[in-house]
Every structure is written in C-alpha cells, then in structure tokens.
C-alpha cells in the first residue's frame, strides 16, 4: 500500500483535528495514513485518529534522555503511542540539524521502536546545475550506516516545498529509482503535493507515497485526496 503522510508543521489546532476526524469518518483505508501534527497535538491526534492512522512527530531530540530542557526524546514519543518521526526535514537542517545529529536521531528512534521518515533533497542551485543525483548520493552516503528496515526516505526537493513547483514526473521517477536502488527502502515524495497532482505522482511505480504539507491543512481538499485515492 502506498503511504499518504501529512506534515502540519507548526500549524493546526484541536478544532482542525476535530473537523478532519468528522470529514474522515467514512474513510476506507487503501493506503497507509501517517499524520504528523505539532508535538502539542500528538496526544489529541492519537485519541482521534489512532484507529485508522499512524501518528508521527516532526522531529525528535538528539539526546535519549537527561537534562535537555525543551527537547523531546524518542522514548517520550513512544510512551504516548507515537509510531513515526520525521528526521532531517530541510526546515530542520536549515536551523542547524547536521548529518551527525540526523544520524543520532535515526539511531535513537530505532532504539525506541519508532519508524523514521528521513528527508533528503537538493536546493534550487543544485537542481539547476544538474547535480541532483550527485548531491542525493552524498546525502544518502553519510546516513547509510544507520538506515534500517523501519526507515522510509522522503525525497523533498527544497525548491518544491511550499512553492507550487514540482519536478516533472519523469524526473521524480528517475530520482526515486535512484534512491530506491541506493537504499533498498520505500521512497515517498514531498513538495507542493496537492489534490490536483497527487494521483499522477502516486501512480509512478517508484513513488511509495507522498508527504503533504500545506494541502493537508485544507480539510476539504485533503479529505478529497484521501477519499479519491
Ligand atoms: P508543501 O506540501 O507545503 O510544499 O510542504 C512539503 C513538506 O515540506 C512536507 O514535509
């Protein structure tokens, strides 16, 4: 089954979760649904969606426990029933998450029994200079030793996130084939996925799913995506 994952980033509310729950009450699941709200809404999402969705966090601490005020460890996430965590999102890499921290976070998640969605993706400059595969190969190489059977790779070209631009389908296919070959893992696509383009993207064989940002906060459109696939 393909994956449809939602990343609400810093947005959303209990009210929006209630609306989504009402809207999805007749949903027949023909895909794996992974819902990643902000930390503060994880517990509420589990209460509302646990029967049909896996709930994920958007990040985790580099530490396993101890005096790290404000951090949230993988074991705390596991304790409340969270079963996925997004690691290495470009928005976190931009705020200082470097390869060594990403590796440690993957190991911590693995130890706590949490599945990981590990993000990779090139910036516009790299894309325009035709160096996408070289760049991805390097990003994957440094993480390879910690990737495991509970890791899903999310290919998210940075220039496609929140911009309304996506690579052409042939490019997505080629890049996913490449990542799949390098890692042997399921590869999902993220970056400006909408109700209008998700079927074309999900229909590509090497696309194991989609990671949806902005569109997943629009309850009517997102619900339509889930009912239509
Ligand atoms: P958008 O769907 O808003 O482009 O965000 C993609 C993303 O970053 C998902 O993790």
Image (cartoon, helix red, strand yellow):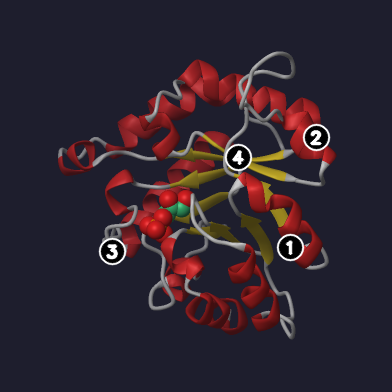
Q: Looking at the image, is 191 positioned above or below residue 111?
A: below
Q: Looking at the image, is 213 positioned above or below residue 225?
A: above
Q: Which residue is mark 4?
A: 184
Between 177 and 73, which is closer to the camera in this rendering?
Answer: 73
Residue 113, numbered circle: 2
Q: Position of residue 201 (x, y in %)?
A: 44, 67
Q: Nearer the viewer, mark 2 or mark 4?
A: 2
Q: Residues within 10 Å of mark 2 (few under 14, many from 20)?
A: some
Ligand 1 sits in quadrant: bottom left
Q: Whole-Å distance between the Cαs marked 2 and 3? A: 35 Å
Give the residue at x 72% y 19%: 64
Q: Which residue is mark 1?
A: 53
Q: Secondary structure at mark 3?
A: loop
Asked whether the beta carbons under mark 3 and mark 4 sit within 8 Å of each other, the answer is no
Q: Whole-Å distance between the Cαs marked 3 and 4? A: 29 Å
Asked whether the beta carbons under mark 2 and mark 3 sit within 8 Å of each other, the answer is no
Q: Earlier in the sequence, mark 2 or mark 4?
A: 2
- On screen, residue 225 versus residue 139, left or right, reads right
Give the residue at x 41% y 30%: 93
Q: Earlier in the sequence, mark 1 or mark 2?
A: 1
């Amino acid at each position: 089954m393909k994956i449809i994952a939602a990343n609400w980033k810093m947005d959303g509310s209990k009210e929006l979760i209630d609306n989504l729950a009402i809207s999805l009450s007749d949903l027949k699941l023909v895909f794996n649904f992974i819902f990643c709200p902000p930390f503060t809404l994880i517990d509420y999402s589990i209460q509302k969606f646990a029967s049909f969705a896996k709930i994920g966090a958007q990040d985790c601490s580099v530490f396993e426990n101890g005096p790290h005020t404000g951090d949230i460890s993988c074991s705390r996430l596991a304790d409340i029933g969270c079963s996925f965590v997004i690691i290495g999102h470009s928005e976190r890499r931009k705020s200082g998450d470097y390869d060594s921290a990403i590796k440690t976070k993957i190991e911590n998640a693995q130890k706590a029994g949490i599945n990981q969605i590990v993000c990779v993706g090139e910036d516009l400059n790299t894309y325009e200079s035709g160096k996408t595969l070289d760049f991805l190969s390097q990003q994957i190489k440094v993480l390879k030793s910690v990737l495991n059977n509970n890791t899903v790779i999310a290919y998210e070209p940075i220039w496609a996130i929140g911009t309304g631009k996506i690579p052409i389908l042939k490019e997505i296919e080629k890049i996913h084939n490449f990542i799949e070959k390098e890692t042997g893992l399921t590869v999902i696509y993220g970056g400006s996925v909408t109700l209008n383009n998700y079927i074309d993207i999900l229909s590509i064989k090497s696309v194991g799913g989609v990671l949806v940002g902005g569109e997943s906060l629009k309850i009517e459109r997102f619900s339509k995506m889930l009912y239509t696939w």
